[in-house]
Image: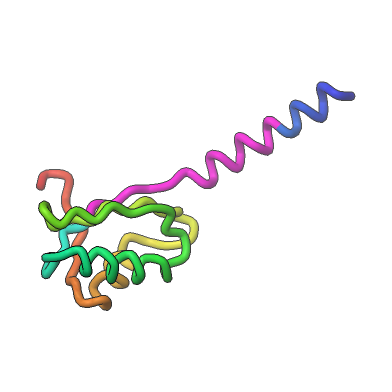
Amino acid sequence: MQKIVVGWMLTLWMGLAVAATPRQVVLHVENLTCPACRITIDTALDKVPGVTSRLVNIETATVTVMFDAERTTVAAVAQAITEAGFPATARTSDG
């Protein structure tokens, strides 16, 4: 009986791990010039359901966002940053 319960729990855990696999997007962001910009973008992304982490890089004018694709989209992430005053577009794989 114990093996059945352990097997069931492992199966459930693995299913949740696969379902919650985050996606990553790198966005090019305009007007990114100072530490206050980072705070504004962080605040905007805090309001987007499913965003799990972000890295704002002022030097490269990019924001790397990890998110749950079941809860949000690249478009929603870019829109939140754009509405905060920093026009954002997803980078293509070749640039």
Instruction: Give the magenta part as a residue range.
Output: 10-26
Which residue is depicted at the point 42% across and 62% down? 72
Q: Quadrant of residue 82?
A: bottom left
How far from the left and from the top, in percent, is residue 4?
82, 26
The answer to whether 57 appears left or right of 72 in the picture is: left
Location of the N terminus by quadrant is top right
Farthest-out residue, front? 35
Q: Nearer the viewer, residue 38 or 74?
A: 38
How far from the left and from the top, in percent, is residue 50?
46, 59
Which residue is depicted at the point 37% across and 51% down? 66
Q: Nearer the viewer, residue 29 or 34?
A: 34
The answer to whether 45 appears left or right of 15 in the picture is: left
Which residue is depicted at the point 42% across and 71% down? 47
Which residue is depicted at the point 61% across and 39% down? 15
Q: Is residue 60 above or below residue 78?
A: above
Q: Is residue 37 above or below residue 67?
A: below
The answer to whether 67 appears left or right of 33 in the picture is: right
Residue 50 lies within the magenta run? no
Farthest-out residue, right? 1
Q: Nearer the viewer, residue 67 or 34?
A: 34
Q: Is residue 45 above or below residue 16?
A: below
**Colour convention:** rainbow
How far from the left and from the top, in percent, is residue 55?
28, 52
Q: Quadrant of residue 31?
A: bottom left
How far from the left and from the top, in percent, is residue 91?
17, 53
